[in-house]
Amino acid sequence: MTDNILETVKASLGLAPDYTPFDTQLIMEINTVLGICNQLGIGAHDYQISDENHGSWDEFLEEEILDNNALNEVKTYVCKRVQLLFDPPTSGILMDSMNRIIEELEWRILVKKETP
């Protein structure tokens, strides 16, 4: 998986890295979710990405001591949250399912963050 946050999110949405028409909107949504991560106690304070060349997972999580599972959970959490903002499901059942996945990921991230 790429270290670039925007590329990771685009891949999770099924968008090619070089497909740029939605980059401005995706960057805005990503920055919103990174702010939510900060409120959960994850990631560099006030970290934001600015374009496809600026914004890596290493920079965002530089102060975090996370195992690979927790790192993947943070990446999945960011991708799912962005998907919910950028391209929400039209079905109520799918929306509920996605919200439950996001809530579980939040809980798991918080537990790992608080457990030595």
Image (spheres, grey):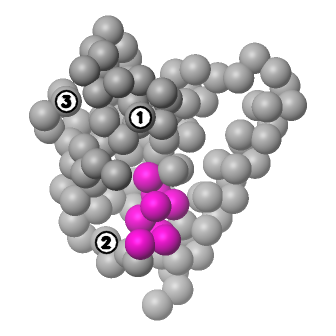
**Helix, strand, or loop for circle 1?**
helix
Foreground residue, 113 or 73? 73
- Image quarter for residue 106? bottom right
Describe residue 50's horizontal placement relative to residue 92 as left or right: left
- Judged by its main secondary structure, the magenta piece is helix
Q: Amino acid at mark 1?
A: Ala
Q: Which residue is mark 3?
A: 52
Q: Which residue is mark 2?
A: 64
- Magenta stretch encompasses residue 74: yes
Q: Which residue is mark 1?
A: 11
Foreground residue, 16 or 42? 16
Residue occupying the point 41% across, 65% down: 71
Who comes first in sequence, dot 1 or dot 3?
1
- Magenta stretch encompasses residue 61: no
Looking at the rendering, the stretch of residues picked out in magenta corresponds to: 68-75
- Alpha carbons under labels 1 and 2: distance apart: 24 Å
Using the image, determine if residue 67 lies above or below residue 80: below
**Helix, strand, or loop for circle 3?**
loop
Foreground residue, 62 or 22? 22
- Alpha carbons under labels 2 and 3: distance apart: 23 Å
Q: Hey, which residue is sitting farthest bottom in the picture?
A: 116
Using the image, determine if residue 108 lies above or below residue 19: below
Q: Amino acid at mark 2?
A: Glu
